[in-house]
């Protein structure tokens, strides 16, 4: 059974930085593109960033572009999201999600999430 | 950017059929995926590519997609189906290409 476990969330002051991690197990991480998706309290899912299977390309949502970096270390089976200049708008549960190799661009496995709370 | 519109809520009695719609411009030309999210849990893929089911998902969950509307159909609804449901597509022409719908709360009466 695929496992994804996020960590690194917490309470952080506005303007500070945070690095989230997602440890993958029970599957070969370097066989998949990986994503971060977030969900503000009571709100819909919002895609944040994607990184290709080998880390050679990344793409970001406009809401985080320029202040976030997605990266991966396949040797450690770990995905990362570095977030800088945080604002209260970044308060959300952050999920890492695996892009499926079956079907057209969908997310077939998700971690339980890590909560980021940005205080003003 | 591409927008997917869902009704905020759908109510259904146990044993009946629930239909959740997902509207978008020519969404019938895209591959639509559906996720179930129960309170305090991560999303779960229940339908991908309009109508296919991942292993372990009951046949009661089905999907269709045509024109400007995709639909998730839950047959013989059970209490355990009560959850939020999100549709999702990939729109290569958008700056944010991985698009989620606004979500629909399915309530089992």
Image: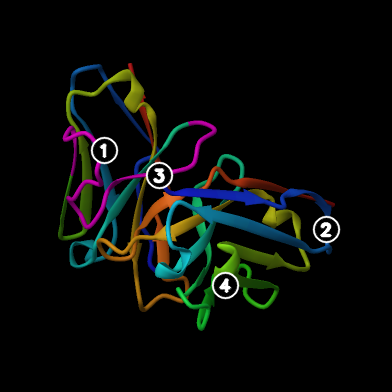
Judge whether residue B51 is colored magenta.
Answer: yes
- Looking at the image, which is closer to me, B50 or A69? A69
Label 2 packing within 10 angstroms: few (<14), some (14-19), many (20+):
some
The answer to whether B6 appears left or right of A22 in the picture is left
Circle 2 sits on which residue?
Answer: A14
Between marks 1 and 2 in the image, the one whose residue lies nearer the viewer:
1
- Disc 4 or 3, which lies upstream in sequence? 3
Label 4 packing within 10 angstroms: few (<14), some (14-19), many (20+):
few
Mark 2 and mark 3: Cα distance apart in space: 37 Å
Between marks 1 and 3 in the image, the one whose residue lies nearer the viewer:
3
Q: Report in which chain the residue with disc 1 lies.
A: B
Residue depicted at x 18% and y 23%: B76
* Residue B47 point in image, percent of width and height: 25, 47
Q: Which label sits on residue A1?
A: 3
Question: Do dots 2 and 3 share one subunit?
Answer: yes
Q: Report in which chain the residue with disc 4 lies.
A: A
Mark 1 and mark 2: Cα distance apart in space: 42 Å
Residue depicted at x 29% and y 50%: B22
Judge whether residue B59 is colored magenta.
Answer: yes
Quick check: marks 2 and 3 in contact, CB under 8 Å?
no
Mark 4 and mark 1: Cα distance apart in space: 35 Å
Circle 1 sits on which residue?
Answer: B56
- Element carrying mark 3: loop
* Residue B108 point in image, percent of width and height: 33, 20
- Disc 2 or 3, which lies upstream in sequence? 3
Mark 2 and mark 4: Cα distance apart in space: 19 Å
Q: Report in which chain the residue with disc 2 lies.
A: A
Quick check: marks 1 and 3 in contact, CB under 8 Å?
no
Quick check: marks 2 and 4 in contact, CB under 8 Å?
no
* Residue B81 point in image, percent of width and height: 33, 27
Magenta residue span: B39-62
């Amino acid at each position: 059974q695929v496992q994804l476990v996020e960590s690194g969330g917490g309470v952080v002051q506005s303007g500070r930085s945070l690095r989230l991690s997602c440890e993958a197990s029970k599957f070969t991480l370097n066989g998949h593109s990986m994503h971060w998706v977030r969900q503000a309290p009571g709100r819909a899912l919002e895609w944040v960033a994607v990184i290709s299977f080998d880390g050679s390309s990344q793409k970001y949502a406009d809401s985080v572009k320029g202040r976030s970096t997605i990266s991966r270390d396949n040797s450690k089976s770990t995905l990362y999201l570095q977030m800088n200049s945080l604002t209260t708008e970044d308060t959300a549960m952050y999920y890492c999600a695996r892009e499926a190799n079956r079907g057209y661009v969908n997310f077939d496995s998700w971690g339980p999430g890590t909560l980021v709370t940005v205080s003003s | 950017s591409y927008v997917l519109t869902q009704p905020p809520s759908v109510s259904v009695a146990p044993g009946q059929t629930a239909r959740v719609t997902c509207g978008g411009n020519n969404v019938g030309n895209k591959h639509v995926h559906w996720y179930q999210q129960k309170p305090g849990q991560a999303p779960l893929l229940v339908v991908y590519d309009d109508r296919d089911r991942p292993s372990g998902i009951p046949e009661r969950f089905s999907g269709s997609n045509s024109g400007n509307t995709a639909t998730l159909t839950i047959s013989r609804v059970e209490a355990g189906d009560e959850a939020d449901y999100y549709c999702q597509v990939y729109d290569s022409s958008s700056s944010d290409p991985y698009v989620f719908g606004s979500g629909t709360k399915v309530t089992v009466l």
